[in-house]
Image (cartoon, rainbow, N blue to C red):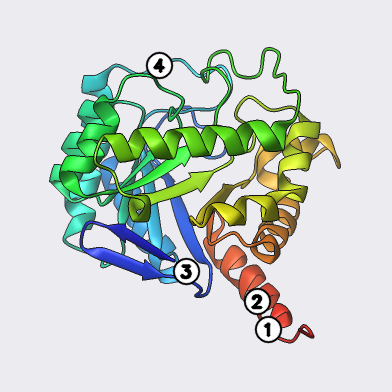
């Protein structure tokens, strides 16, 4: 299985990739405001690469539950200078976490290679055309509703089956826009229009998505559903995040999106070492 993102190619199976998170925002739930300044965001990104991040995900608009939209000009102001600086300083792919086609286009022109689209449930194909034209990687994430509405009343008859159907449908639509399968990564969207039970069902059933033969990205880092079990604040959810990351890798996930990169790299490398010694 191959993932192509402009000049980058990843061939699987291989050790799982850790995608470091850089929120260039004042209001993201985990670290809002810490890296809003461009120079601080760049320094944070460089630190994450030093910790072992093989991908960097940069976002200028919070997508936490209830977050208010950011106007396009402001999102561009936040992320483009960071991407331009990092593109000359790092050799890892840069991912733009955005729902706006114009922001994605500008980010790709500035040096990004991947579009991380939490709004892959869109009906308009403008974003997919941008991805196709650039030959970029595309993270297709499942979300029920929008960040403003997604947690109001999530409901599924069968969350695993419905997310799988969504992925199959989106792959057809992407293909129709010129985005090939080897550009696509699937993300089940933990916490995006899901209850605690839905999140647990998706994590327990991750292996079922491997039959789609596309890399799976899992983003669980510091999310609120972890705190609902032991009751931990965002800053205290690292142990739960690492447990989910290890289980995701065991189930076949290839990319783990994380705030705590060094700890996540250690956890998944240990998981992979143990898995390598399982009896076949």
Q: Earlier in the sequence, mark 2 or mark 4?
A: 4
Q: Secondary structure at mark 3?
A: helix
Closer to us: mark 3 or mark 2? 2
- Residue 230 appears left or right of 55: right
Q: CA distance from mark 3 to mark 4?
A: 31 Å
Q: Secondary structure at mark 4?
A: loop
Q: CA distance from mark 2 to mark 1?
A: 6 Å
Q: Residue at x 32, y 19 (%)?
A: 124
- Residue 72 appears left or right of 12: left
Kindly identify which residue carries mark 1: 276
Q: Earlier in the sequence, mark 1 or mark 3?
A: 3
Q: Earlier in the sequence, mark 4 or mark 1?
A: 4
Looking at the rendered image, the quarter that the C terminus falls into is bottom right
Q: Residue at x 54, y 32 (%)?
A: 166
Q: CA distance from mark 1 to mark 3?
A: 23 Å
Q: Earlier in the sequence, mark 3 or mark 4?
A: 3
Is there any visible trace of residue 46 in the rendered image? yes
Kindly identify which residue carries mark 3: 51
Question: Do the numbered discs 2 and 1 sit on residues whose CB atoms are within 8 Å?
Answer: yes
Disc assigned to residue 69: 4
The percent coordinates of residue 95 (x first, y second) are 33, 48
Characterize the local packing of mark 2: few (<14), some (14-19) or many (20 or more) Cα atoms within 10 angstroms: some
């Amino acid at each position: 299985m191959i993932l192509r993102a402009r000049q980058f190619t990843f061939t699987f199976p291989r050790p799982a990739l850790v995608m470091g998170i850089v929120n260039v925002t004042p209001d993201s739930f985990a670290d809002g405001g810490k890296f809003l300044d461009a120079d601080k965001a760049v320094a944070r990104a460089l630190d994450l690469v030093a910790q072992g991040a093989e991908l960097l995900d940069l976002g200028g608009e919070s997508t936490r539950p209830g977050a208010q939209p950011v106007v396009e000009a402001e999102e561009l102001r936040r992320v483009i200078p960071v991407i331009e600086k990092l593109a000359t300083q790092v050799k890892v792919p840069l991912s733009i976490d955005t729902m706006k086609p114009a922001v994605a286009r500008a980010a790709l022109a500035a040096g990004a290679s991947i579009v991380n689209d939490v709004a892959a449930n869109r009906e308009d194909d403008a974003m997919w055309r941008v991805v196709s034209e650039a030959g970029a990687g595309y993270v297709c994430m499942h979300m029920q509703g929008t960040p403003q509405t997604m947690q109001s009343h999530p409901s599924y008859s069968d969350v695993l089956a419905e997310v799988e159907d969504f992925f199959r449908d989106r792959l057809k639509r992407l293909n129709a826009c010129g985005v090939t399968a080897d550009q696509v990564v699937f993300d089940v969207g933990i916490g995006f229009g899901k209850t605690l039970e839905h999140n647990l069902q998706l994590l327990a059933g991750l292996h079922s998505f491997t039959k789609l033969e596309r890399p799976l990205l899992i983003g669980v880092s510091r999310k609120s559903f972890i705190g609902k079990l032991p009751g931990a604040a965002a800053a205290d959810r690292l142990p739960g995040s690492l447990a989910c990351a290890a289980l995701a890798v065991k189930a076949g996930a290839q990319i783990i999106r994380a705030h705590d990169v060094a700890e996540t790299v250690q956890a998944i490398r240990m998981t992979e070492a143990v898995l390598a010694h399982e009896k076949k």
